[in-house]
Image (spheres, rainbow, N blue to C red):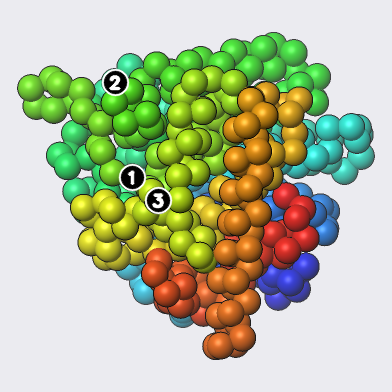
Amino acid sequence: MLKVSGLFCLLCHVGDPSLTLIHGLQNVRFKGYLWDEGFHQQLVRLWDLDWTLKILKSWFGKTDELGWIPRQMIIGAEVRWSARPSSWPQIPCSANPPSHHWVLDSILKQESDNGGGLLDDFLREIWMPLERNFKWYLRTQTSLIPGLLRWAGRTREYCLPSGMDDYPRAPIMTKREAHLDLHSWMIVSSRAISKTASRLGKSEEYIYYEELSKNLTKLLLDNFWDEDRNLMDDFYFSKTGEKKFVGHFGYLNFFPLFLHALPTDSNEFAGAMSRLLDRGNGMWTKFGLRSLSSHDPYYLKGDSYWTGLIWFNINYLAISSFFNYANNPIDYPMSNSLRGMIRLAYHELRQGLIRLVVENFVDTGFIWEVYDGSTGKGQDNHPFTGWTALIVNVLAEIY
Protein backbone atom coordinates (compact mmCIF):
# COMPACT_ATOMS: atom_id res chain seq x y z
CA MET A 1 0.00 0.00 0.00
CA LEU A 2 1.38 3.40 -1.01
CA LYS A 3 0.49 6.83 0.35
CA VAL A 4 0.28 9.47 -2.40
CA SER A 5 -0.65 13.11 -1.70
CA GLY A 6 -2.94 12.23 1.20
CA LEU A 7 -4.77 9.48 -0.69
CA PHE A 8 -3.85 5.82 -0.56
CA CYS A 9 -3.15 3.60 -3.54
CA LEU A 10 -3.49 -0.16 -3.48
CA LEU A 11 -1.62 -2.56 -5.73
CA CYS A 12 -3.76 -5.70 -5.98
CA HIS A 13 -2.67 -8.86 -7.77
CA VAL A 14 -3.36 -12.58 -7.81
CA GLY A 15 -0.31 -13.76 -9.71
CA ASP A 16 -1.54 -12.89 -13.19
CA PRO A 17 -0.11 -9.47 -14.24
CA SER A 18 -3.35 -8.76 -16.12
CA LEU A 19 -5.10 -8.86 -12.74
CA THR A 20 -3.12 -6.04 -11.20
CA LEU A 21 -4.57 -2.62 -10.48
CA ILE A 22 -3.18 0.52 -8.90
CA HIS A 23 -6.02 2.68 -7.63
CA GLY A 24 -7.05 5.21 -5.02
CA LEU A 25 -8.69 4.03 -1.80
CA GLN A 26 -11.78 5.81 -0.50
CA ASN A 27 -11.80 4.06 2.88
CA VAL A 28 -11.24 0.62 4.34
CA ARG A 29 -13.07 -1.00 1.41
CA PHE A 30 -10.23 -1.91 -0.94
CA LYS A 31 -12.26 -2.13 -4.15
CA GLY A 32 -11.37 0.04 -7.11
CA TYR A 33 -14.29 2.14 -8.39
CA LEU A 34 -13.99 3.49 -11.92
CA TRP A 35 -15.90 6.74 -11.55
CA ASP A 36 -14.42 7.47 -8.12
CA GLU A 37 -10.96 7.24 -9.65
CA GLY A 38 -11.34 10.29 -11.86
CA PHE A 39 -12.17 12.39 -8.80
CA HIS A 40 -9.24 10.95 -6.85
CA GLN A 41 -6.87 11.89 -9.66
CA GLN A 42 -8.16 15.47 -9.89
CA LEU A 43 -6.36 15.86 -6.56
CA VAL A 44 -3.33 13.65 -7.08
CA ARG A 45 -2.45 15.06 -10.53
CA LEU A 46 -1.88 18.55 -9.13
CA TRP A 47 0.77 17.32 -6.70
CA ASP A 48 2.16 14.22 -8.39
CA LEU A 49 1.26 13.89 -12.07
CA ASP A 50 3.56 10.89 -12.51
CA TRP A 51 1.48 8.87 -10.06
CA THR A 52 -1.74 9.86 -11.77
CA LEU A 53 -0.39 8.65 -15.10
CA LYS A 54 0.62 5.32 -13.52
CA ILE A 55 -2.84 4.89 -12.01
CA LEU A 56 -4.67 5.82 -15.22
CA LYS A 57 -2.43 3.49 -17.20
CA SER A 58 -3.33 0.72 -14.77
CA TRP A 59 -7.06 1.31 -15.30
CA PHE A 60 -6.75 1.55 -19.08
CA GLY A 61 -4.81 -1.70 -18.92
CA LYS A 62 -8.02 -3.41 -17.78
CA THR A 63 -9.79 -2.59 -21.05
CA ASP A 64 -10.90 -5.84 -22.67
CA GLU A 65 -10.93 -6.58 -26.39
CA LEU A 66 -14.42 -5.08 -26.75
CA GLY A 67 -13.51 -1.88 -24.89
CA TRP A 68 -15.15 -2.55 -21.52
CA ILE A 69 -13.57 -1.57 -18.19
CA PRO A 70 -15.34 -3.02 -15.11
CA ARG A 71 -17.07 -0.41 -12.94
CA GLN A 72 -15.68 -2.12 -9.83
CA MET A 73 -12.41 -4.03 -9.53
CA ILE A 74 -12.43 -6.62 -6.75
CA ILE A 75 -9.03 -8.26 -7.10
CA GLY A 76 -7.13 -10.39 -4.61
CA ALA A 77 -7.97 -12.31 -1.46
CA GLU A 78 -7.77 -9.31 0.90
CA VAL A 79 -10.11 -7.24 -1.25
CA ARG A 80 -12.57 -10.09 -1.72
CA TRP A 81 -12.60 -10.67 2.02
CA SER A 82 -14.02 -7.14 2.43
CA ALA A 83 -16.67 -7.47 -0.31
CA ARG A 84 -19.80 -9.59 -0.60
CA PRO A 85 -19.25 -12.51 -3.03
CA SER A 86 -22.35 -11.38 -4.93
CA SER A 87 -20.47 -8.18 -5.84
CA TRP A 88 -17.41 -9.93 -7.28
CA PRO A 89 -18.78 -10.65 -10.80
CA GLN A 90 -19.09 -7.62 -13.06
CA ILE A 91 -21.59 -7.29 -15.92
CA PRO A 92 -19.82 -6.58 -19.24
CA CYS A 93 -22.59 -4.30 -20.55
CA SER A 94 -22.64 -2.23 -17.34
CA ALA A 95 -20.99 1.18 -17.62
CA ASN A 96 -19.90 3.82 -15.15
CA PRO A 97 -19.37 7.55 -15.72
CA PRO A 98 -16.06 7.85 -17.63
CA SER A 99 -14.38 10.12 -15.12
CA HIS A 100 -11.06 8.64 -16.25
CA HIS A 101 -11.66 10.45 -19.56
CA TRP A 102 -12.53 13.64 -17.67
CA VAL A 103 -9.28 13.68 -15.71
CA LEU A 104 -7.37 12.96 -18.92
CA ASP A 105 -9.07 16.01 -20.48
CA SER A 106 -8.01 18.08 -17.44
CA ILE A 107 -4.41 16.88 -17.71
CA LEU A 108 -4.23 17.69 -21.41
CA LYS A 109 -5.56 21.18 -20.77
CA GLN A 110 -3.11 21.71 -17.90
CA GLU A 111 -0.13 20.40 -19.89
CA SER A 112 -1.05 21.90 -23.28
CA ASP A 113 2.16 23.93 -23.43
CA ASN A 114 4.44 21.12 -22.26
CA GLY A 115 5.46 18.84 -25.12
CA GLY A 116 7.21 15.47 -25.08
CA GLY A 117 8.37 13.47 -22.11
CA LEU A 118 6.44 11.21 -19.81
CA LEU A 119 2.98 12.46 -20.79
CA ASP A 120 3.42 11.76 -24.49
CA ASP A 121 4.81 8.30 -23.74
CA PHE A 122 1.75 7.67 -21.58
CA LEU A 123 -0.63 8.87 -24.30
CA ARG A 124 0.96 6.59 -26.88
CA GLU A 125 0.55 3.62 -24.54
CA ILE A 126 -3.11 4.26 -23.74
CA TRP A 127 -4.26 5.39 -27.21
CA MET A 128 -5.65 2.04 -28.35
CA PRO A 129 -7.51 1.15 -25.12
CA LEU A 130 -8.77 4.75 -24.83
CA GLU A 131 -10.25 4.66 -28.31
CA ARG A 132 -11.65 1.17 -27.76
CA ASN A 133 -13.20 2.19 -24.44
CA PHE A 134 -14.83 5.33 -25.90
CA LYS A 135 -16.32 3.36 -28.80
CA TRP A 136 -17.61 0.78 -26.30
CA TYR A 137 -19.70 3.48 -24.57
CA LEU A 138 -21.13 4.67 -27.89
CA ARG A 139 -21.90 1.12 -28.97
CA THR A 140 -23.37 -0.36 -25.79
CA GLN A 141 -25.19 2.55 -24.13
CA THR A 142 -27.47 3.31 -27.06
CA SER A 143 -31.03 4.54 -26.97
CA LEU A 144 -33.65 3.64 -29.55
CA ILE A 145 -33.75 7.39 -30.25
CA PRO A 146 -31.25 7.82 -33.11
CA GLY A 147 -27.92 9.33 -32.07
CA LEU A 148 -28.73 9.44 -28.36
CA LEU A 149 -27.67 7.41 -25.34
CA ARG A 150 -29.10 5.81 -22.22
CA TRP A 151 -27.54 3.95 -19.31
CA ALA A 152 -27.98 0.26 -20.10
CA GLY A 153 -29.24 -1.78 -17.18
CA ARG A 154 -31.30 0.80 -15.31
CA THR A 155 -34.36 -0.44 -13.46
CA ARG A 156 -37.48 1.37 -12.34
CA GLU A 157 -35.90 2.18 -8.96
CA TYR A 158 -32.19 2.38 -9.73
CA CYS A 159 -29.71 3.53 -12.33
CA LEU A 160 -26.53 2.07 -10.83
CA PRO A 161 -24.35 2.55 -13.96
CA SER A 162 -24.84 6.33 -13.72
CA GLY A 163 -23.28 6.43 -10.24
CA MET A 164 -26.37 8.29 -8.94
CA ASP A 165 -28.06 5.10 -7.83
CA ASP A 166 -31.59 6.11 -6.80
CA TYR A 167 -31.78 9.52 -8.52
CA PRO A 168 -35.22 9.58 -10.23
CA ARG A 169 -35.39 8.80 -13.94
CA ALA A 170 -38.30 8.25 -16.35
CA PRO A 171 -41.39 6.81 -14.63
CA ILE A 172 -41.72 4.01 -17.20
CA MET A 173 -39.21 1.44 -18.42
CA THR A 174 -38.39 2.14 -22.04
CA LYS A 175 -35.42 2.15 -24.39
CA ARG A 176 -36.91 5.21 -26.06
CA GLU A 177 -35.33 7.48 -23.46
CA ALA A 178 -32.16 9.59 -23.38
CA HIS A 179 -29.99 10.39 -20.37
CA LEU A 180 -28.58 13.88 -20.06
CA ASP A 181 -25.70 13.02 -17.75
CA LEU A 182 -24.42 10.24 -20.03
CA HIS A 183 -24.65 12.50 -23.08
CA SER A 184 -22.66 15.18 -21.23
CA TRP A 185 -20.00 12.65 -20.22
CA MET A 186 -19.65 11.57 -23.85
CA ILE A 187 -18.99 15.17 -24.88
CA VAL A 188 -16.17 15.21 -22.32
CA SER A 189 -14.86 11.87 -23.64
CA SER A 190 -14.91 13.04 -27.26
CA ARG A 191 -13.06 16.19 -26.20
CA ALA A 192 -10.39 14.16 -24.39
CA ILE A 193 -9.80 11.73 -27.23
CA SER A 194 -9.71 14.57 -29.77
CA LYS A 195 -7.02 16.36 -27.74
CA THR A 196 -5.09 13.12 -27.39
CA ALA A 197 -5.17 12.51 -31.14
CA SER A 198 -4.01 16.07 -31.81
CA ARG A 199 -1.12 15.78 -29.37
CA LEU A 200 -0.01 12.48 -30.91
CA GLY A 201 -0.15 13.90 -34.44
CA LYS A 202 -3.03 11.64 -35.50
CA SER A 203 -4.60 14.16 -37.86
CA GLU A 204 -7.35 11.94 -39.30
CA GLU A 205 -8.46 10.77 -35.87
CA TYR A 206 -8.34 14.32 -34.54
CA ILE A 207 -10.63 15.57 -37.30
CA TYR A 208 -13.02 12.65 -36.77
CA TYR A 209 -13.34 13.06 -33.00
CA GLU A 210 -13.46 16.84 -33.15
CA GLU A 211 -16.41 16.59 -35.55
CA LEU A 212 -18.03 13.95 -33.35
CA SER A 213 -17.72 16.28 -30.35
CA LYS A 214 -19.47 19.05 -32.28
CA ASN A 215 -22.23 16.65 -33.36
CA LEU A 216 -22.79 15.49 -29.78
CA THR A 217 -23.05 19.12 -28.66
CA LYS A 218 -25.61 19.83 -31.38
CA LEU A 219 -27.64 16.78 -30.33
CA LEU A 220 -27.52 18.04 -26.74
CA LEU A 221 -28.94 21.42 -27.74
CA ASP A 222 -31.51 19.98 -30.14
CA ASN A 223 -32.94 17.30 -27.87
CA PHE A 224 -32.49 17.94 -24.15
CA TRP A 225 -33.65 21.56 -23.78
CA ASP A 226 -36.99 21.91 -22.01
CA GLU A 227 -38.21 25.29 -23.24
CA ASP A 228 -41.07 25.44 -20.74
CA ARG A 229 -38.76 25.02 -17.73
CA ASN A 230 -35.70 26.82 -19.15
CA LEU A 231 -33.70 23.74 -18.25
CA MET A 232 -31.90 20.67 -19.61
CA ASP A 233 -33.39 17.30 -18.66
CA ASP A 234 -33.68 13.57 -19.36
CA PHE A 235 -36.58 12.74 -21.65
CA TYR A 236 -38.48 9.72 -22.93
CA PHE A 237 -41.32 8.84 -25.28
CA SER A 238 -44.54 7.64 -23.70
CA LYS A 239 -46.50 4.63 -24.91
CA THR A 240 -48.54 7.00 -27.09
CA GLY A 241 -45.38 8.39 -28.70
CA GLU A 242 -45.38 11.74 -26.87
CA LYS A 243 -42.02 13.24 -25.93
CA LYS A 244 -41.90 13.98 -22.20
CA PHE A 245 -39.21 15.50 -20.02
CA VAL A 246 -38.73 13.66 -16.74
CA GLY A 247 -39.36 16.82 -14.75
CA HIS A 248 -37.24 16.52 -11.59
CA PHE A 249 -34.86 19.25 -10.40
CA GLY A 250 -31.41 18.45 -9.11
CA TYR A 251 -27.84 17.57 -10.02
CA LEU A 252 -28.75 15.85 -13.26
CA ASN A 253 -30.17 18.98 -14.90
CA PHE A 254 -26.83 20.75 -14.64
CA PHE A 255 -24.33 18.17 -15.86
CA PRO A 256 -23.88 20.11 -19.14
CA LEU A 257 -22.81 23.13 -17.06
CA PHE A 258 -20.65 21.14 -14.65
CA LEU A 259 -18.82 19.36 -17.49
CA HIS A 260 -18.44 22.38 -19.81
CA ALA A 261 -20.61 20.66 -22.41
CA LEU A 262 -22.71 23.73 -23.36
CA PRO A 263 -21.45 26.73 -25.35
CA THR A 264 -21.28 29.51 -22.77
CA ASP A 265 -22.52 32.14 -25.21
CA SER A 266 -25.73 30.19 -25.89
CA ASN A 267 -29.20 31.06 -24.59
CA GLU A 268 -29.42 27.56 -23.14
CA PHE A 269 -26.32 28.11 -21.02
CA ALA A 270 -27.60 31.43 -19.69
CA GLY A 271 -31.04 29.98 -18.97
CA ALA A 272 -29.80 26.87 -17.20
CA MET A 273 -27.20 28.81 -15.23
CA SER A 274 -29.83 31.26 -14.02
CA ARG A 275 -31.90 28.33 -12.72
CA LEU A 276 -28.85 26.87 -10.96
CA LEU A 277 -27.83 30.17 -9.36
CA ASP A 278 -31.31 30.83 -7.94
CA ARG A 279 -30.75 30.48 -4.19
CA GLY A 280 -34.41 29.62 -3.71
CA ASN A 281 -34.35 26.58 -6.01
CA GLY A 282 -34.16 24.09 -3.13
CA MET A 283 -30.66 22.84 -3.98
CA TRP A 284 -28.67 25.53 -2.18
CA THR A 285 -27.88 25.08 1.51
CA LYS A 286 -25.29 26.74 3.74
CA PHE A 287 -23.21 23.57 3.33
CA GLY A 288 -23.36 22.99 -0.43
CA LEU A 289 -25.74 21.81 -3.15
CA ARG A 290 -28.33 19.10 -2.46
CA SER A 291 -28.59 16.26 -4.97
CA LEU A 292 -32.32 16.88 -5.42
CA SER A 293 -34.26 20.05 -4.69
CA SER A 294 -36.18 20.12 -1.43
CA HIS A 295 -39.14 21.35 -3.52
CA ASP A 296 -39.09 18.22 -5.70
CA PRO A 297 -41.89 15.71 -5.03
CA TYR A 298 -39.30 12.90 -4.92
CA TYR A 299 -37.14 14.65 -2.30
CA LEU A 300 -35.70 12.14 0.22
CA LYS A 301 -37.68 9.28 -1.33
CA GLY A 302 -36.25 6.06 -2.73
CA ASP A 303 -33.26 5.17 -0.57
CA SER A 304 -32.77 8.84 0.37
CA TYR A 305 -29.30 8.47 -1.12
CA TRP A 306 -29.19 10.63 -4.24
CA THR A 307 -32.55 12.28 -3.54
CA GLY A 308 -31.49 15.15 -1.30
CA LEU A 309 -28.13 14.45 0.35
CA ILE A 310 -25.05 16.60 -0.32
CA TRP A 311 -22.43 14.78 -2.38
CA PHE A 312 -18.96 16.30 -2.45
CA ASN A 313 -18.01 14.91 -5.87
CA ILE A 314 -20.85 16.69 -7.68
CA ASN A 315 -20.30 19.82 -5.63
CA TYR A 316 -16.70 19.65 -6.85
CA LEU A 317 -17.93 19.50 -10.45
CA ALA A 318 -20.06 22.57 -9.71
CA ILE A 319 -17.43 24.66 -7.91
CA SER A 320 -14.64 23.87 -10.37
CA SER A 321 -16.90 24.85 -13.27
CA PHE A 322 -17.88 28.09 -11.48
CA PHE A 323 -14.19 28.89 -10.99
CA ASN A 324 -13.38 28.31 -14.65
CA TYR A 325 -16.39 30.26 -15.94
CA ALA A 326 -15.65 33.17 -13.60
CA ASN A 327 -11.94 33.44 -14.40
CA ASN A 328 -11.48 32.47 -18.04
CA PRO A 329 -13.31 34.88 -20.39
CA ILE A 330 -11.35 33.72 -23.44
CA ASP A 331 -12.46 30.08 -23.28
CA TYR A 332 -15.88 30.85 -21.81
CA PRO A 333 -17.41 33.98 -23.36
CA MET A 334 -20.58 35.31 -21.70
CA SER A 335 -22.05 38.57 -20.46
CA ASN A 336 -20.20 40.39 -17.69
CA SER A 337 -23.30 40.34 -15.51
CA LEU A 338 -23.65 36.56 -15.73
CA ARG A 339 -19.95 36.07 -15.06
CA GLY A 340 -20.27 38.28 -11.98
CA MET A 341 -23.18 36.20 -10.70
CA ILE A 342 -21.17 33.00 -11.19
CA ARG A 343 -18.23 34.53 -9.31
CA LEU A 344 -20.45 35.32 -6.33
CA ALA A 345 -21.90 31.81 -6.39
CA TYR A 346 -18.38 30.37 -6.47
CA HIS A 347 -17.37 32.17 -3.28
CA GLU A 348 -20.61 31.23 -1.51
CA LEU A 349 -20.34 27.57 -2.48
CA ARG A 350 -16.66 27.47 -1.51
CA GLN A 351 -17.40 28.78 1.99
CA GLY A 352 -20.23 26.28 2.34
CA LEU A 353 -18.10 23.28 1.36
CA ILE A 354 -15.28 24.31 3.68
CA ARG A 355 -17.81 24.69 6.51
CA LEU A 356 -19.28 21.27 5.67
CA VAL A 357 -16.04 19.30 5.83
CA VAL A 358 -14.28 21.23 8.59
CA GLU A 359 -17.20 21.31 11.04
CA ASN A 360 -17.80 17.59 10.60
CA PHE A 361 -14.11 16.84 11.07
CA VAL A 362 -13.98 18.93 14.24
CA ASP A 363 -17.14 17.31 15.62
CA THR A 364 -16.45 13.68 14.67
CA GLY A 365 -12.80 13.36 13.63
CA PHE A 366 -13.88 12.02 10.24
CA ILE A 367 -14.26 13.02 6.61
CA TRP A 368 -17.48 11.47 5.29
CA GLU A 369 -18.76 10.09 2.00
CA VAL A 370 -22.02 12.05 1.99
CA TYR A 371 -23.74 14.70 4.12
CA ASP A 372 -27.29 15.44 5.27
CA GLY A 373 -29.00 17.98 3.03
CA SER A 374 -30.48 19.96 5.92
CA THR A 375 -28.07 19.65 8.85
CA GLY A 376 -24.85 19.00 6.96
CA LYS A 377 -24.07 16.07 9.27
CA GLY A 378 -21.84 13.34 7.81
CA GLN A 379 -23.48 10.03 6.88
CA ASP A 380 -22.59 6.53 5.71
CA ASN A 381 -18.96 5.65 4.94
CA HIS A 382 -16.25 7.16 7.11
CA PRO A 383 -13.40 7.81 7.14
CA PHE A 384 -13.81 8.65 3.45
CA THR A 385 -10.76 10.35 1.97
CA GLY A 386 -11.88 9.52 -1.55
CA TRP A 387 -13.55 12.28 -3.53
CA THR A 388 -14.24 14.26 -0.35
CA ALA A 389 -10.45 14.78 -0.18
CA LEU A 390 -11.00 17.28 -3.01
CA ILE A 391 -11.61 19.78 -0.22
CA VAL A 392 -7.83 20.27 -0.56
CA ASN A 393 -8.33 21.65 -4.09
CA VAL A 394 -11.14 23.88 -2.84
CA LEU A 395 -9.01 25.26 0.00
CA ALA A 396 -6.07 25.88 -2.35
CA GLU A 397 -8.35 27.16 -5.15
CA ILE A 398 -6.50 24.97 -7.62
CA TYR A 399 -8.78 23.15 -10.01
| Mark 1 and mark 3 residues within 8 Å of each other at the beta carbon | no
Q: Quadrant of the N terminus?
A: bottom right
The location of residue 382, given as percent across then percent down, is 51, 79
Describe the element under mark 2 as helix, strand or loop.
loop
| Mark 2 and mark 1 residues within 8 Å of each other at the beta carbon | no
**Amino acid at pointer 1:** Phe
The location of residue 85, given as percent across then percent down, is 36, 71
Q: Which residue is mark 3?
A: 280
Q: Which residue is mark 1?
A: 249
**Amino acid at pointer 3:** Gly
Judge whether 211 appears above or below 16 on screen.
above
Res. 62 visible in picture: no
Mark 2 vs mark 1: give the one in front. 1
Q: Residue at x 63, y 68 (%)?
A: 354
399 with respect to 167 (left or right): right
Q: Which residue is mark 2?
A: 145
**Amino acid at pointer 2:** Ile
